[in-house]
Each structure stands twice: as C-alpha cells, then as structure tokens.
Image (cartoon, grey):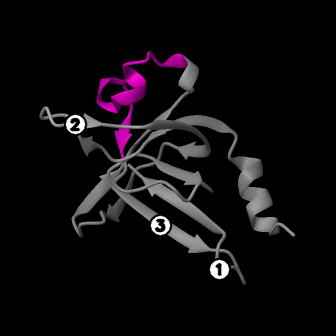
C-alpha cells in the first residue's frame, strides 16, 4: 500500500524537469552527462543552506522530488526533454537556466525504509 504522503507529493509534483547525472570525464577535458525526465515541484525561493561541502550558500530554488536517483553535482532544469536539442541532452551547461544541485535533503517516510521525499537546493 502506498503511503499517503507519497501520494500527496506525487500529486503536487506536476512540473516537468530534466535531470542530468553528475558528469564523468570524457577523456578530452570535458564531461559526459546523461539526462532523464522527472516530475517536481519547483519553488523559486531564496534560502540560506549548507552545501554538501559545508559552505553556506544562498539557494535560489527549492525543488521537491520523489526520484531518489538525484545526486549533488548533477544538474536540473525546469522544462521538458522535448524542448532540448540532442547536444543539450548531453551537456546541461549549454542549457540556459540549468542549475547545479548543491544540496539534497532526504527524509524517509514514516515507518518506511525505502520511500523518501527529497528536497533539492540549487
């Protein structure tokens, strides 16, 4: 049985976004990225947070997701895969508005070991 909190989060996460995994060296001084479509709730709010490295930063967006594959160092962009060119699908730095993920907060659902709600800061 699915948790009511997950149902609610999925209900409010209706915006399309694109996520790029953290880059891996391509052997030529650049990085290779893999993109995928996700659903989110993207709130443009400024908030002081600690980045994963311990530095205090001002995040300009707080993004609610249920996808647990997101990682710090990846990129996220509010939009659809269909709006990107083939070269943009592998290079988030060429997409205006794509932002690097600086912090992820994972909260397990009540009485759950494997279902999480995540808040991403960029």
Task: Tell me which numbered mark, 3 or 1, is placed earlier along the sequence.
Answer: 3
Residue position marked by numbered label 2 in the rendering: 26
Q: Nearer the viewer, residue 17 or 58?
A: 17
Tell me the quadrant of the picture where the N terminus can be found: bottom right
Mark 1 Cα-neighbour bin, 10 Å: few <14, some 14–19, many ≥20: few
Instruction: Report how far apart the C-alphas of labels 3 and 2 lie in the structure.
Output: 29 Å
Q: Which residue is identified by label 3?
A: 105
Which residue is found at the position 48% from the left and 42% from the top? 44
Mark 3 and mark 1 in contact? Answer it, CB < 8 Å: no
Q: Is residue 23 left or right of residue 76?
A: left
Question: Which label sits in the foreground, 3 or 1?
Answer: 1
Magenta range: 83-100
Q: Which mark is residue 113?
A: 1
Residue 31 numbered tag:
none
Which quadrant would residue 104 be assigned to in this image?
Answer: bottom left
Q: Secondary structure at mark 3?
A: strand
Give the x, y percent position of residue 103.
37, 60
**Residue 3, quarter of the rendered image:** bottom right
In the image, residue 93 above or below residue 86: below
Mark 3 vs mark 2, foreground winner is 2
Question: Residue at horizontal 38%, vertical 48%?
Answer: 122
Residue 67 place in picture, x, y as percent = 59, 54
Residue at x-position 54% and y-position 28% = 79
Queried whether the magenta region covers residue 97, the answer comes back as: yes
Q: Which badge, 3 or 2, is on the more N-terminal residue?
A: 2
Classify 53 as above or below 29. Answer: below
Asked if the residues shown at circle 3 and circle 2 are in contact, with their CB atoms under 8 angstroms apart, the answer is: no
């Amino acid at each position: 049985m699915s948790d009511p909190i997950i149902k609610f989060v999925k209900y409010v996460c209706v915006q399309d976004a694109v996520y790029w995994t953290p880059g891996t060296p391509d052997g030529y001084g650049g990085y290779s990225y893999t993109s995928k479509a996700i659903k989110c709730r993207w709130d443009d709010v400024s908030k002081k947070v600690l980045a994963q490295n311990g530095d205090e930063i001002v995040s300009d967006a707080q993004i609610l997701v249920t996808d647990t594959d997101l990682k710090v160092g990846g990129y996220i962009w509010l939009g659809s895969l269909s709006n990107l060119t083939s070269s943009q699908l592998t290079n988030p730095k060429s997409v205006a508005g794509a932002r690097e993920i600086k912090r992820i907060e994972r909260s397990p659902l009540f009485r759950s070991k494997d279902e999480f709600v995540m808040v991403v800061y960029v």
